[in-house]
Amino acid sequence: MGLLTNLKDSISRVTDGLFAADEPKRIGIYGPPNAGKTTLANRIARDWTGDAVGPESHIPHETRRARRKENVEIERNGRKVTIDIVDTPGVTTKVDYKEFLDHDMEKDDAIRRSREATEGVAEAMHWLREDVDGVIYVLDSTTDPFTQVNTMLIGIIESQDLPALILANKTDLPGSDVQQIANAFPQHETIPLSALEGENMDEVYTKIAEYFG
Amino acid sequence: MPGPTPNVDGDDAPSDDSDDGVRIDMISGARMDGLTGMEKIRLILDGVRDGNIVILEEGLSPDEESKLIEVTMTEISPDDFTGIEIETYPKAEAGDQSFLDKLMGRKSTQKLTVIGPANQIETLHKDENLISTLVSRK
């Protein structure tokens, strides 16, 4: 009986391994709040499936739950890559509901939003440790990338040996400095883009196919 | 069986209930070495939630940093605890690693780390050689 069970398990492992190669890779879109993660996730999803992933907003922590768009097929140079996009809440080490009051929000709504945001960040960290196969790290190229959260997250991603693509977003805005991001993380390739305007998405898709295919 | 909750207070530690200043706990690498990841996080967060500044001689591993963020998020509550401010020097370059570390693919996690309550500590300047922070009382 034990022998049969072992044999069944062995066969199961071999077949799982064969099919695993064809399974979509879960690619987490990470970064600090307001870097344009959901705008990028929506751009990718709309370009390849016609659907959006979630609402976008200039108010921080609009995304408070990790959202997954499954089976996004990206074709590049005759090669097809299937990924699940996981749009995650912006990672931070602090959330103060009073910051939301500046966005014309009532106190109760601000407290609820901050509570949901903290749950979302905790969830995003859990996904990063357990449930993603690769990371697209999105940074706002108009802001200083030398922050503790960025340093820690890139360190966490590297420690997990996850393939990581760094995107310098918001190149359509004045003050965009892609080189500053490249200098901050020289061990990774930095790709400039404007997810909002759809600029340089061709290169982004080529790199997604190359990194995660 | 879980061990006792680690605490930086020794028997001869002076009372820290004073409202006159900000307490700084400088924790050596040797003290952290014997703790599990969760014990380290508890030690840090208990201190920070009491309004203390915690300075770690050797910092945390990336996995511990990830869990520190996760646990911090679960403890944030309105008008009580808004989270942490954390600063470390940038990671040491490969040139600083020992030959054995390079051979084994080990990366040093030793980096001085400053952690404090988000509403009491503000980073004024940070570069590879200097972390300058402004600490205020509650």
Image: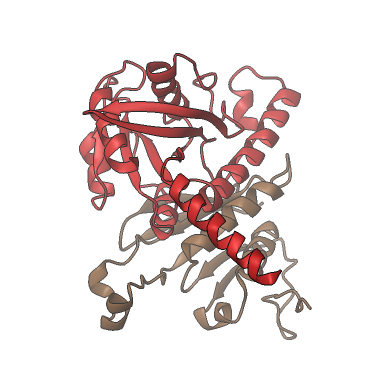
Q: Quadrant of the C terminus of chain A?
A: top left
Q: Quadrant of the N terminus of chain A?
A: bottom right
- Chain B tint as drawn: brown
Q: Is the residue B121 above or below the residue A101 in the image?
A: below
Residue B120 appears in view: no
Residue that extends furthest to the right in the rendered view of this protein: B1
Q: Is the residue A36 above or below the residue A165 in the image?
A: above
Residue at position x 37%, y 51% from top? B125
Q: Position of residue B108 (x, y in %)?
A: 37, 72
Residue A79, by quadrant, is top left
| Front one among A148 and A189 | A189
Residue A178 appears in view: yes
Q: Position of residue B22 (x, y in %)?
A: 62, 62
Residue at position x 36%, y 54% from top? B126
Q: Is the residue A66 above or below the residue A75 in the image?
A: below
| Front one among A63 and B47 | A63
The chain drawn in red is: A
Q: How many numbered marks appear?
A: 0
- Please indicate whether residue B52 sits to the left or right of residue B130 in the image: right
- Please indicate whether residue B14 sits to the left or right of residue A148 in the image: right
Q: Position of residue B117 (x, y in %)?
A: 61, 53
Residue at position x 31%, y 18% from top? A198
- Please indicate whether residue B31 sits to the left or right of residue A47 in the image: right
Residue that extends furthest to the bottom in the rendered view of this protein: B12
- Please indicate whether residue B17 sits to the left or right of residue A89 in the image: right
Residue at position x 30%, y 35% from top? A209
Q: Position of residue B71 (x, y in %)?
A: 65, 54
Residue B68, by quadrant, is bottom right
